[in-house]
Image: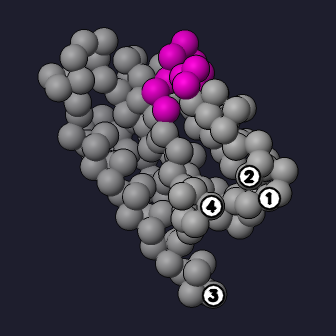
């Protein structure tokens, strides 16, 4: 299914400043044939992550996803937003490389921040726009 997609947006929680073990397993165990045969070459890629702390070293997770995409010869799309002026704005965490979100170390249902969800939606729309331009030869 991923080989047929024009774009892939990677996502992982950030634990202890790193992507999750399950995402590492995906990178290491599930994508070998795609890597060797360069099946994802020139696909559009982007990423998002969430951690319990507001900052929580999420940049390292996005950098891991970005490097993974580069190893697959993918084209990384950044968030494409300036930093919000406050935490309550779109991109209030202030990420450039991808979407970041924060959930208090409690139930996600009670701690999601609508601005973070809207930032992730923005990333999805931005990736779709760039993918459309790329596929149309612009």
Q: Nearer the viewer, mark 3 or mark 4?
A: 4
Find disc 2 in the rendering and name its residue: 34
Which x, y percent locates residue 115?
26, 42
Label 4: element kind: helix
N-terminal of the pair, mark 1 or mark 3, is: 1
Q: Would residue 3 be counted in the magenta stretch? A: no
Occupied quadrant, residue 121: bottom left
Magenta stretch contains residue 21: yes
How many circles with numbers are drawn on the protein?
A: 4
Q: Residue furthest left?
A: 110
Tell whether 67 sits left or right of 94.
right
Q: Which residue is mark 3?
A: 137
Can the viewer see residue 57 in this picture?
Answer: no
For numbered disc 3, what is the local secondary structure? loop
Among the two numbered marks 1 and 4 on one chain, the one whose residue lies closer to the N terminus: 4
Residue 137 visible in the picture: yes
Q: Name the residue that disc number 1 marks.
A: 38
Q: Nearer the viewer, residue 124 or 32?
A: 32
Label 1 to label 2: alpha-carbon separation: 6 Å
Residue range in magenta is 12-22
Nearest the eye: 1 or 125? 1
Q: Of the residues under marks 3 and 4, which one precedes in the sequence?
A: 4
Q: Which residue is mark 4?
A: 3
The reply to whether discs 4 and 2 touch (Cβ–Cβ < 8 Å) is: yes
Distance from Cα at disc 3 to Cα at disc 2: 24 Å
């Amino acid at each position: 299914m991923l080989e047929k997609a024009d774009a892939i947006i990677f996502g992982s929680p950030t634990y202890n400043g790193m992507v999750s073990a399950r995402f590492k397993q995906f990178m290491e165990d599930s994508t070998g044939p795609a890597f060797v045969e360069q099946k994802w070459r020139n696909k559009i890629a982007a990423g998002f992550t969430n951690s319990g702390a507001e900052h929580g070293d999420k940049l390292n997770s996005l950098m891991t996803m970005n490097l993974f995409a580069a190893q697959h010869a993918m084209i990384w799309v950044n968030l494409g937003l300036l930093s919000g002026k406050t935490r309550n704005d779109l991109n209030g965490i202030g990420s450039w490389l991808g979407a970041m979100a924060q959930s208090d170390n409690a139930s996600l249902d009670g701690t999601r921040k609508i601005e973070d969800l809207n930032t992730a939606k923005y990333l999805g729309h931005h990736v779709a726009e760039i993918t459309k331009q790329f596929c149309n030869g612009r």
